[in-house]
Amino acid sequence: MRKTFYGIVLVIFLFTSKVFAADAFEFHHVFDLVNNSFYTGCNLMYLNYKEDNLEVDPTLPGNVGDKGLVYRILLNFRKVFIERVYTDLFGEFGTGNIKYDGYLLNPPHTPVQRTNFNNFIDLNLRLGGILLNQECLQVIPYGGLGYRYWDRNINGTYEYYNYKAVIGAKINFLLFGDLVLSPYANFGRTLGAHAKGDASDANNNNIGKLKFALQGKPIYEFGLEVTYKLENDFLIGGMASYTSYEYGKSDWQMAADGRKFIEPNSKTSEIRVGVGIRFGFI
């Protein structure tokens, strides 16, 4: 009888161990797919850009700005090395009809409202480590570098570009089943920001291009990713994010006709929502 009892206990123990092992494997498999995968999708970005012209010259009619929707394609590649080292590389490429609301720089500062296609490029790399790896939770701190380019089409072509350095953290949280929520937050600074644009004379004729070096300012990014595993290595995902950053005003630059120009302080906010598919590999 005692041997029979011990045998039953042993069978229950082995069966329970296999069940827990299977559950643990399934759980880790979901996180591994999120962290080792390729993603492609599209998102919609709302751009809100404002220039503080009055701070440079209080006699001007007011500040100017750009607003509009941008349609973007997102590509993302993630890989974890030696079980802890986390890498995340992604790029966004977009275009959209952006409305400029301002005025001509030369007196009498005729009001101008134009809607033109603008192009955008964003590239980002994050490198960090899986600091906490528990049954329903992963915490991943990281550092990151990025690059942003904006082809701003107003009355002539303007180009803005900058690098950025951030530190941040991401959380992978297993809500239920195979649904993973991944909020993240980044804080950093814009670096090497520049603006290039067309200069015009008193008759609004083009007299060449000017290049402005802009001051670095803080950048803040907050976002949420939602990923659901459908089957095997195939997942679907959605995202939402908010980004805010500023450019500090440049020094005065002299154009070919002797007139001076300056790029003012500016602030940009970007709101994104998107969906896509993710292909995991382990």
Image (cartoon, rainbow, N blue to C red):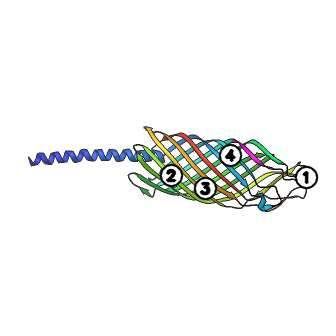
Residue type (three-letter) at the residue carrying disc 4: Phe
Indicate whether residue 104 is drawn in magenta: yes
Spot occupied by residue 56 in the image (x, y as percentages of width and height): 79, 61
Residue placed under numbered mark 4 in the picture:
120
Bounds of the magenta segment: 96-107
Q: Residue at x 82, y 48 (%)?
A: 111
Q: Which residue is mark 1?
A: 202
Residue type of the residue flagged with mark 1: Ala
Local secondary structure at mark 4 = strand
Relative image position of residue 230 (x, y in whole percent): 44, 37
Tell me which residue sits at (54%, 45%) in the image.
Answer: 239
Q: CA distance from mark 4 to mark 3?
A: 17 Å
Tell me the number on the disc at residue 145: 3
Judge whether 128 appears above or below 153 on screen: below
**Residue drawn at 60 percent across, 57 percent down:** 220
Query: Which residue has dot 2 on it?
Result: 183
- Which mark is in front, 4 or 3? 4
